Amino acid sequence: MTRTRSAPTLDDVAQLAGVSTATVSRCLNAPDRVVEGTRKKVLAAVDELGYTPNFGARAMAAKRTFTIGAIIPTMDNAIFARGIQAFQEALFERGYTLLVASSSYDPQVEADQIRSLVARGADGLFLIGYERDPAVYDYLAQQSVPVLISWAFDAQQNVPTVGFDNRKGMRAIAEAIIGLGHRRIAVVSGMLDGNDRTTERVEGIREALSAHGIDPDTVPVLQTPYEIDNGTEAFKSLMTSATPPTAVICGNDVLAVGALLGAQDLGLTVPADVSITGFDDIELARIVTPALTTVHVPHRDMGRKAAEALIEMVETKAPVASVEIPITLKMRGSLAPPKE
Amino acid sequence: MTRTRSAPTLDDVAQLAGVSTATVSRCLNAPDRVVEGTRKKVLAAVDELGYTPNFGARAMAAKRTFTIGAIIPTMDNAIFARGIQAFQEALFERGYTLLVASSSYDPQVEADQIRSLVARGADGLFLIGYERDPAVYDYLAQQSVPVLISWAFDAQQNVPTVGFDNRKGMRAIAEAIIGLGHRRIAVVSGMLDGNDRTTERVEGIREALSAHGIDPDTVPVLQTPYEIDNGTEAFKSLMTSATPPTAVICGNDVLAVGALLGAQDLGLTVPADVSITGFDDIELARIVTPALTTVHVPHRDMGRKAAEALIEMVETKAPVASVEIPITLKMRGSLAPPKE
């Protein structure tokens, strides 16, 4: 580990195999265009020297690196875990390697990571949500790197997408809550700034409220980063206010689980004293007591379909039609009619 | 997105800026060695053309890419999530980008991903556990790519490590179970083959059993991949056997949560009817009812310390001393003395 790096070069391989560097390059990039005897000699030399083909040169010759880059906001909290794992498994089956970076929900970090992945020759990029500096999209178009959006779906956007409609999903859950008779409703949302998914979810709630004659501006919306403890804290502040809500709509399951723990701390019974809902249907949602009413996102299915779509874009150099992944309301024990 | 890729080259930048390609290269890799006027001209040309420095050329000039590669067995199930997120945040603070690949617990996939990350110029690699083909370690030594191991600690191994002792952790939990009077014990383990962490955990249990006069070979050990549903299934098969155990030691929290759900299905009360324990202390462990007795791994602390150690290896080109991360038994509601 301490010796100086002195990686073998294409020249070293050519010399050991007794062929030209062009032949070595052809062996590595188009082996079917080289006679078998030569190919074997070259591959033996590659093995003996432990030669790692220079990435840039190989990419130029093959026009593809079989590497896909994904940037997700966080690796923590399992929000993106299942979908990304399925995405990577589907890519792997097709011979592609996935490299994942995590931006910590910071647009500037994401922009740097996009440039880094493109510089490392990513054949295509998988990004979460639409909202980012237009300069980033311009850069990707200029570099002709296909990009696929996920975890969001908006028919108005013209970037290819395999994702779900956050607004529609949250509107459905809000309709269910209002339908059960709740009128004193509060929202614990993720941070809205720079996050089109959270923003759409809150819009969905506002639409449902308006449709049922409740002024959305009377409904408190607390914003907090997606962490269990933040959900607990926000829930407690709502429930200890002068007019506590009978139902708390949480921006995702992580916040909703935090809210459930907050109810335990306050000695409140869910759903008898207060209803709590989530979004995503990650595993947390079904293992808590009571299990969470939430919006079910078919993460594995979405990840696999996204992989197919992005590979098609990479291989055909053409955009694909966007796909809306259907999401469904999952009614479980954490939601019931209000007491009064 | 459909136009042909025609990325601007170093030559294009040099031509537009009216300088030599060597000057452009120097501007990008050692800007303090170029006078300001020239630097500004070059950077303006870089911006105007949307030039992305060729990765190979830049890496050669800078001798470093400020990219770290990590390969984890899975992105699903949150087992590695919190530690990797902390690892990436600490790297980011020091100016490094983290690229993560997931091997699906397949050694061959991991070996391919290691070569892929090295070919893309990773300055250092972060790998989980020690156990892999010696040829992989030879390759990394030959390439002079520093590698740091985590999620394991074994003073006998000579690869630098920032991790915890799986055997010691599981021995502690088994000692606690035996100390409460349990004698009919069973184990639901992750898959043992090719996974030194699971193997060490089972060894820790066997040590504790032997130390208390229980023949380890009389204790059933079921192996199953780390998925909640697998934990449920394995637990049910143990509890419906002729001599059901009074305590089930699970290889990690994911399996233990599955076992808890299995107990619910069977109408068993935990811990009155049967005790269940986990390992990791991920968030799942504290949000289930009853909360899990488990081994607490300080994932965030481990991730940050690992980042510091790997950066030191990359920057000094020397190995670092291994660090054992202390782990502690977390007693919660899922463990109690046996009924009889």
Image: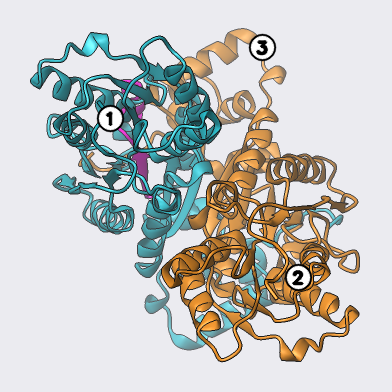
Chain colours: A cyan, B orange
Residue at horizontal 35%, vertical 24%? Answer: A132
- From the viewer's side, name the closer residue of A44 and B95: B95
Residue B287, given in percent of the width and then of the height, sits at: 54, 46
Mark 1: which amino acid? Lys
Give the magenta range.
A123-139
Within 10 angstroms of label 2, few (less than 14), some, or many (20 or more) residues? Answer: few
Query: Can residue A21 be seen by looking at this rendering?
Result: no
Chain of the residue under label 1 = A
Decide: marks 2, 3 in contact (CB < 8 A)? no
Q: Is residue A171 left or right of residue A211?
A: right
Decide: marks 2, 1 in contact (CB < 8 A)? no
Mark 2: which amino acid? Asp
Decide: marks 3, 1 in contact (CB < 8 A)? no
Residue A58, given in percent of the width and then of the height, sits at: 48, 58
Determine if marks 2 and 1 fall on one subunit. Answer: no
Looking at marks 2 and 3 on the same chain, the residue that comes earlier in the sequence is marked by 3
- From the viewer's side, name the closer residue of A38 and B194: B194
Residue at horizontal 29%, vertical 30%? Answer: A130
Residue B236, compared with residue A191, is above or below; it is: below
Query: Marks 2 and 1, Cα distance to the nearest angstrom?
Result: 68 Å
Mark 3: which amino acid? Val
Q: Can you tell which of label 2 and label 3 is closer to the viewer?
A: 2
Q: Which mark is residue A339?
A: 1
Residue at horizontal 82%, vertical 50%? Answer: B325
Q: Which quadrant holds residue B180? A: bottom right
Q: Is residue A310 left or right of residue A192?
A: left
